[in-house]
Amino acid sequence: MNNDMIIKTTELRKSFQRGEETVHALNGVSLDIKQGEFLSIVGASGSGKTTFLNMISCLDKPSSGSIVVDNIDVSSFPEKKLIKVRRDHFGFIFQYFFLIPTLTVSENIQLPLMFAGKKKTNQELSTLLSKIGLEKRMHHLPGQLSGGEMQRVAIARALINDPKIIIADEPTGNLDSTNSQLIFDLFRQLNKDLRVTIICATHNLDLANQTDRIIHLKDGKVLDGPVVCNV
Amino acid sequence: MNIPTFAFRSLFIRKIRTILTVMGVAIVLSVFFTVYTFSTGYKQALQNEYSSFGINILAVPKGCPYEATSLLMHGGKIDKSMTFEQLDAIRQHPGVEIVSPIHIHHAKLSPGAYETALYGIEESMFDLKSEWKLEGNHFSKEDAPEAYLGSQARKKMAIALGDKIDITVKLGEEEKTFSVTLVGSLQQTGTSDDNFIYLPILFIKTIVPPGHTIKGIAIRVKQGFSIGKVAEDLNQIPDVQTVTYKQVQYTLNDLLDTTTQLLNLAMIFTLLIGIIGLINTIFMSIEDRRKELGMLKAIGAGNKDIIQIIMTETGILVLVGSIIGIIMALSLSTTWEILVRKLISSAPPGQLSHFSPLIILLTVIVSVVIGTLASIIPCITATKISPMEVIRNE
């Protein structure tokens, strides 16, 4: 694999049973994602966006095909090894933030460190918080923050372990257009400053158009050509 | 941040549920603690009372000897009576050292409108009950209209030596009132004796109808004689039945053991209900937090971490519950004791609940076992939660 490549999928397929029907969520997706790339995945509901994100972020195993993450073929890794790859390489951002309401901003951000058995100095923490513009909100509880601020906390949480890849699934799905734009601006900034790869599933074409590349999924396959449909 | 701190703070997300769960655990463990302290304390108090009894054999009228024994010891009504001929026959046995007849009757005393058991005794009772220490004078005559009071009874009546006491007793359908002079007071013994009034049995003989004077006979056996053999001999006297101190002790212990076993069974059911309730609460909590747990897995938590979080949360709940339960049980013990004494008039004197660090430790161990058992199934469920549940937004 090219040294520049952070994720490479080959003929990735995922099928599952729904009653008597076999659903093919992914139908042979082959994709190369470069280190430091900011790309968006678009497609209608049921197109396979989430399934694809689950596969590449080691949350789920493919039915067939291969996934290589940072030169490691994880396709047949057992769960324990997948957790390690997930911890070391990925940061996650979700639509609904999932902040722990009884923990402060600072404590929420440090959660991944607790599971990884790592520690950050206060200085490192302050630097990260200032990058996302929350240095003054460090000791606030999530309930005291706005939606946009909560998503910023979730971004900081995703970055705390210095991951090479950020997986964001509909990160602006719960925000208004102003906040959505602010979040995408922050993504762009982080992508530029930290050279972190950002893979973002979204329904919002305006935002998707601001990324380096758009992957359009339909019926579990990558569509070639420009995205014209309303996703 | 570490897992115990995280688990502790997570309990504050749903405060009411946490408080209710802790209170549920506290009540269950308080029941466990109370039952355990009372069953051991009651047995101990009974043992202490019998140990200080000083009587080897109690002769009672034929019937239920154990009931008669209990009534004689703690006060109560005995319908059947013994005769002076039977008393003489017992006295003639070469193996008996001290023989002391006893009368017992329910009485209302004035001043103070104090209701208690009236005992007719001989002075020989002082030889049998070594813990009896008299303040004041002994009876001037064997049939003098005089009385001794137990320490508690005197305190309740608030009277001085030399004062008159009016005693009302029920004889058949009629009530009879007579006066006696308080000549002596027994120092505190820590037994039921502290609550009673004592009159010369021969004075009682002039009050009650003929043939109703003696309700029981306390006997001490001479050194070198077998208590069992003497009791067997005395059983040959017509209409006399004997109970040895050991028999009473064994029987009451057996009875107490049976009661304790029933209580233990009830206790096991209570603990089971507690465990099921706790499993249900933890389950509900996990169902509510599926997305949160999925998120934790997505950001790097392994199954071991998730189990540790749930176990710690449960551990905190049961530990706090056990501490509150123990405090509840300790602060309610006096109330329970009053209630037990109201329900069981023959309850032995002294403290009925027996607290020790061992019982506290046992309660904490039980709480840990409850917590561990209750968290096993929810832990298994939690490990099966997929982080994909968080990612799957649609």
Image: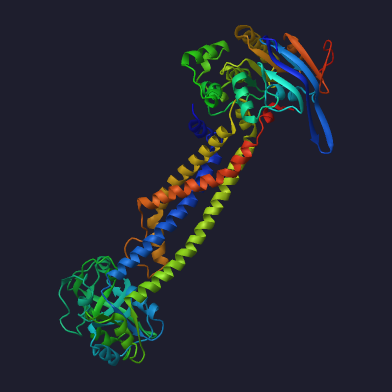
Outermost residue, top direction? A192
Residue B149 or A188: which is nearer the viewer?
Answer: A188
The correct choice, above or below, for B135 with respect to A50 in the image is: below
In percent of width and height, residue A14 lies at: 78, 27
The correct choice, above or below, for A72 with respect to B359 in the image is: above
Determine the residue positioned at 39% across, 78% down. B66
> In this view of the protein, can residue A172 be seen by the observer?
no
Q: In the visual, does B102 lie left or right of B390?
A: left
In percent of width and height, residue B239 lies at: 36, 90
- The answer to which quarter of the image holds residue B342 is bottom left
- The answer to which quarter of the image holds residue B76 is bottom left
Q: In the visual, does A114 lie left or right of B92?
A: right
In percent of width and height, residue A208 lies at: 74, 12
The correct choice, above or below, for B57 with respect to B352 in the image is: below
> In this view of the protein, can residue B321 be seen by the observer?
yes
- The answer to which quarter of the image holds residue A181 is top right
The correct choice, above or below, for B276 with respect to B304 in the image is: below
The C terminus of chain A lies in which quarter of the figure? top right
The colour scheme of the drawn protein is rainbow
The N terminus of chain A lies in which quarter of the figure? top right
Residue A223 or B346: which is nearer the viewer?
Answer: A223
Determine the residue positioned at 33% across, 67% down. B47
Residue B84 or A113: which is nearer the viewer?
Answer: A113
Residue B246 or B20: which is nearer the viewer?
Answer: B246
Q: In the visual, does B140 lie left or right of B33?
A: left
